[in-house]
Amino acid sequence: MAEIKTKSVEISDTNRELQKVLKSGKVLIGTNETLKALRGKEKEVKVVIYASNCPEKIKEGFKEVTKQKKGNVPFYEYPVNSLELGLACGKPYSIASLCILDTGKSDILRHIEKEKKR
């Protein structure tokens, strides 16, 4: 029971930080937009976030582009499906992935690092 509560707190904390980024930062939503950013302005990409049900082919594509550019972009698997990620972003459709170019007033990078260590 405690594990379920902890996971729901993690998701709500991540949602809160994601909302801050959407309001005060710069986010590109969608697989194609994320790939374009990684290919072109990869140095500007702070983090790539993808849904838990994001197809493996897409995740591998992100990592391959990053490796080709010899980049060091962090990847974060959001612990919700693409429909829930879309809702977290305030969109009425599913979102498999997004990338953050500017974190704005949020601490999402620190929050993601903390989540990865768990």
Image: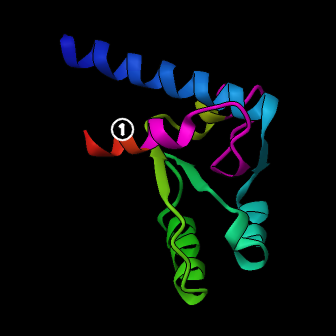
- Looking at the rendered structure, the secondary structure element under dot 1 is helix
Residue 4, horizontal then vertical, whole percent = 28, 17
Residue denoted by label 1: 115
Q: Residues within 10 Å of mark 1 (few under 14, many from 20)?
A: some
| Coloring applied to the structure | rainbow
Nearer to me, 55 or 61: 61
On whether residue 90 falls in the magenta region, the answer is: yes
Quadrant housing residue 87:
top right
Left or right: residue 10 versus residue 22 is left
- Residue at 57% across / 49% down in the picture? 49
Q: Which quarter shows the C terminus?
A: top left
Question: x, y (%) of residue 54?
Answer: 53, 53
Name the amino acid type tagged 1: Glu
The residue at the point 49 percent across, 60 percent down is 74
Which residues lie in the magenta part? 86-112
The x and y percentages for residue 96 are: 63, 49
Q: Residue at x 52, y 60 (%)?
A: 55
Q: Is residue 45 depicted above or below 15 in this figure?
A: below
Q: Is residue 92 in the magenta section?
A: yes
Left or right, 118 with respect to 77, comes to left
Residue 73 percent across, percent down from the top left? 54, 66
Is 50 rendered above or below residue 44?
Answer: above
